[in-house]
Image (tube, helix red, strand yellow):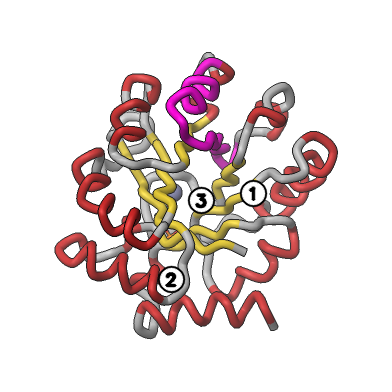
Amino acid sequence: MLLAPSILGADLGALRAHAREAIEAGCEWLHVDVMDGHFVPNISFGVPVMQSLRALAEETETLLDVHLMIEEPDRYLRDFADAGAGLLTVHAEACPHLHRTVQHIKELGCQAGVALNPATPLTALDHILPDLDLVLVMSVNPGFAGQAYIPATKAKIGHVARRAAQAKPDLLIQVDGGVTPENAAQNVQAGANVLVAASAIFKGNGTIAENVRAFRDAVSS
Ligand code: DX5
Ligand code: ZN
């Protein structure tokens, strides 16, 4: 199980220090939530914030996992790739030519992910699953940290895992939104192998390191 703390939950004034703390506590990836105020109702941050994390990511060999909650993501893929993204995830709902977008991501040398909103059926990926490195199953409606996990997500992750077993056995299955130590194990049992968490890691009860440990303990017990 890989942990991808979302920097959306971090104190941006201390972003590098907090990101380093999460990495030193054992998180493999950093999840960068990019929001444009159109595809989702909120605006977060973009390429400059990526650039400020790049040296840390390179020094610690941490993958920058960029979740693009934006319209017309093709316009910005190169900028994010140039800023150090290792994985670029676009939303199926924002990409009328999803196959082209996925090929574009790969041409830029990044791993390619596609995210599905809670109401988007998995059939949207029927003909493209073997081309993907990652499917991101949204467990909240994207736009904000701190929302409650939608329970139907667990079954959806199971569907993705069963499809992947036939079409793409090494697919990464990521779950994002309302993920906590309390529901971590059920997501992993359903088939998720990458957990994203903003609030539960950066705003949880303990220190960042303690919060990361709570996820590991929950999944290993
Ligand atoms: C939601 C973002 C998530 C968010 C998760 O729109 O894609 O990555 O930061 O936040 P929590 O873990 O607080 O639900
Ligand atoms: Zn996200």
Amino acid type, label 3: Val
Q: Mark 3 points at which residue?
A: 140
Foreground: 150 or 113? Answer: 113
Cα distance in 3D space between marks 2 and 1: 19 Å
Q: Residue 173 carries which label?
A: 1
**What residue is rendered at 48% in x and 62% in y?**
28
Q: Name the residue under label 2.
A: 200
Q: Is mark 2 within 8 Å of ligand 1?
A: yes
Q: Does the residue labelled 3 lie within 8 Å of ligand 1?
A: yes
> For the residue carrying disc 1, how many other residues have a C-alpha within 10 Å: few (<14), some (14-19), or many (20+)?
many
Cα distance in 3D space between marks 3 and 2: 14 Å
Residue 175 in the image: state x and y as whole percent: 57, 53
Cα distance in 3D space between marks 1 and 3: 16 Å
Circle nearer the viewer, 1 or 3: 1
Q: Left or right: 112 with respect to 73?
A: right
Residue 159 in the image: state x and y as whole percent: 77, 45
Marks 1 and 3, the one that precedes in the sequence = 3
State which quarter of the image contains the C terminus.
Answer: bottom right
Question: Where on the picture, by quarter, is residue 120?
Answer: top right
* Count of numbered labels shown in the rendering: 3
Amino acid type, label 1: Ile
Is residue 112 shown in magenta?
Answer: yes
Are the residues flagged by discs 2 and 1 in contact, CB closer than 8 Å?
A: no
> For the residue carrying disc 3, how many other residues have a C-alpha within 10 Å: few (<14), some (14-19), or many (20+)?
many
User: Which range is magenta?
Assistant: 100-119
Is residue 39 shown in magenta?
Answer: no
